[in-house]
Amino acid sequence: MKKTILTHLSFFSVLLLLVLIASCKKDEAKPAVPEILSVSTIKKTDSLIYEGNMGDWIAIHGTSLANIMEIKLNDVLVDLEEIYEENGVVYLQIPVKLPIEITDKLYLTTKGGASVLNFKVNSPDLELTGMFNEYTLPGDTIRIYGKFLQLYEVDASNSVVLFGEMESPVIAATDNYLTAKVPATVQPNVKVKLRNNKYNAEAVCPGYYQDKNHVITSFDSDFPYTSGTGQQWVGAGPEPKPTSGNYIRFEVDQQKYPNGLGWFYLMENSYDYQLDMIQHPEKYVLKFELNMGLPIRKTNFFIYYYWAVAPSPIGGDFFTVQNLGRWQTIAIPLEKIIPMGNTGTSTSFSLNFRVENFSPVEQVAMYFDNFRIYKKGE
């Protein structure tokens, strides 16, 4: 009899416990559905914004924004460890990551539900800014500088460099430059592009590979050096190895020239400038390839286009390279050579290269090639 009573008591105890649990669940308040009302900057929380840049700090205003489970901008997740929520405002930094799917929307999810608001994230364009050596030999490795290469995850698996129509896989990339092999059968005077297949992006490099536009002289048969001045210094090496045929060398050492070379003309070549170059030199640069065995400190160069114009000295501030003993493309603003404000219409002049190297002798080992004028932005 006692066993029967105890069994009944146990049954009713369990039943009562289940009823109480069910009653408690009914009494629990269901989380409210969140609602995003607006977005602002964190500095001006009363000023609404509808777009922002990667890396910007923003404030999300709304209701029921506690206990956030997920925030997305497009399809990019925000790290919840990096957000801060207080009094109906969520503070966060827009992730510096490109979306695969662009929806231009902000998504916020809590236990109570989800809310969506139109919001555009601006991402920087993939950029190329220049080639280390525009006359890198076919078959050699070229370094090309750029911006946001890591943002676009540029690497050998998803990106190629185009030399005209010829593709070459990216070998490696940092955020500032990439390397690729110049095709062995590449044609000169072609544009260089980067194609990123992961984000369907493309960037065009300023300048041309083996630029043949507005060439003053290449010291070769295509753009010959016609002056007699400095012909004794024109040759093909053997050291350093040429970028393309002949180049001109400027070498000074203390034993051969104990008193220096004084001032002399290294080169001068006739050239028909374009009228726009004469009247708007600020839109152009003088480009050439430079190989330096030693840095210079005292040697000055005077580059000018017309005998009647007094040139200003140009020294190591412009004649410098990143790596000694390697060919590198150098650019000097054309207004350093042609004075601003020229209203003349004569265009048939020359490029004159005068050098000053006095005692006490500074040792010099400099080699030049492919003098040309380049219009900025082309």
Image (cartoon, grey):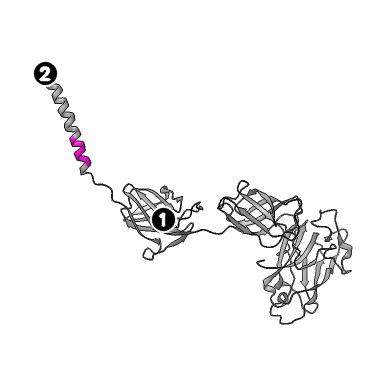
Q: Is residue 359 above or below residue 140?
A: below
Asked if residue 26 lies left or right of residue 347, the reply is left
Residue of label 2: 2
Q: Position of residue 181 (x, y in %)?
A: 71, 50
**Is the residue marked by circle 2 packed among few (<14), some (14-19), or many (20+) residues within 10 Å?**
few
In which quadrant of the rendered view does residue 346 lie? bottom right
**Majority secondary structure of magenta residues:** helix
Residue pictured at 43% horizontal, 51% vertical: 72
Q: Secondary structure beneath disc 1? A: strand
| Magenta span | 19-25
In the foreground, 137 or 319: 137
Residue at the extreme front of the image, as rendered: 165
Instruction: Give the image quarter of residue 359.
Output: bottom right
Q: Residue at x 69, y 80 (%)?
A: 341
Residue 323 can be seen in this image? yes
The residue nearer to you, when weighing 268 against 222, is 222
Name the quadrant of the N terminus: top left
Q: Nearer the viewer, residue 136 or 84?
A: 136
Residue 263 seen in the figure: no
Q: Which residue is mark 1?
A: 106
Q: Residue furthest left?
A: 1
The x, y position of residue 157, in whole percent, is 61, 46
The quadrant the C terminus occupies is bottom right
Residue at left offset 11%, top offset 21%: 5
* Residue at the image position 22 percent from the left and 41 percent from the top: 25
The amino acid at mark 1 is Leu
Mark 1: few/some/many CA within 10 Å (<14, 14-19, 20+): many
Task: Say which element carries label 2.
Answer: helix
371 within the magenta span: no
